[in-house]
Image (spheres, rainbow, N blue to C red):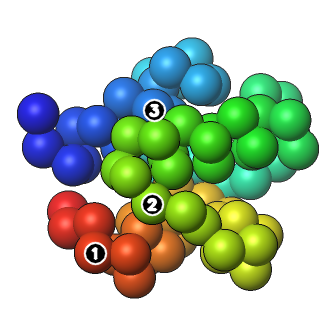
Amino acid sequence: MTNLEKYDKLFLAAFKVDPETLPTLKYRGIPQWDSLGHMDLMGDMEETFGVSLSTVDVLDFSSYEKGKEILAKYGVEF
């Protein structure tokens, strides 16, 4: 499984959305992506990719696309 497939799978599992909507997903853009959903997603990201996100990066993780940029800083390639 590629990193992009893993990444997508985390969003799909956490928020129960259609794959086509992933590129437009934004924090608080859907009811499921609230503060609790966000922290669950961050924990899953850290576990899946073996990283420890800084507080600044957790707060900056504001969309599906932004998340890929942030994870790239930790060596996760998409």
Q: Is residue 37 shown above or below 58?
A: above
Report the side of 75 relative to 62 (left or right): left
Q: Nearer the viewer, residue 26 or 52?
A: 52
Neighbor class of circle 3 (other Cα within 10 Å; few <14, some 14-19, many 20+) is: some
Cα distance between the residues tagged 3 and 1: 18 Å
On residue 32, the disc is none
In this figure, which residue is indicated by the disc labeled 3? 10
Of marks 3 and 1, the one in the foreground: 1
Name which residue lies at 28% across and 66% down: 76
Q: What is the spatial separation of the Cα atoms under label 1 and label 2, in whole angstroms?
A: 9 Å
Residue under label 1, please give it.
75
Q: Are marks 1 and 2 in contact (CB under 8 Å)?
A: yes
- Is tag 2's residue or tag 3's residue first in the polypeptide sequence? 3
**Coordinates of residue 32 in the picture (x, y in percent):** 77, 28
Dot 2: what SS? loop
Q: Mark 2: which amino acid?
A: Val
Question: Could you tell me if residue 14 is visible in this image?
Answer: yes
Question: Toward which corner of the image does residue 33 lie, by quadrant?
Answer: top right
The C terminus - image quarter: bottom left
Residue that label 2 marks: 51
The amino acid pointed to by label 1 is: Gly
Asked which secondary structure carries label 1, the reply is: loop
Task: Classify 63 as above or below 31.
Answer: below
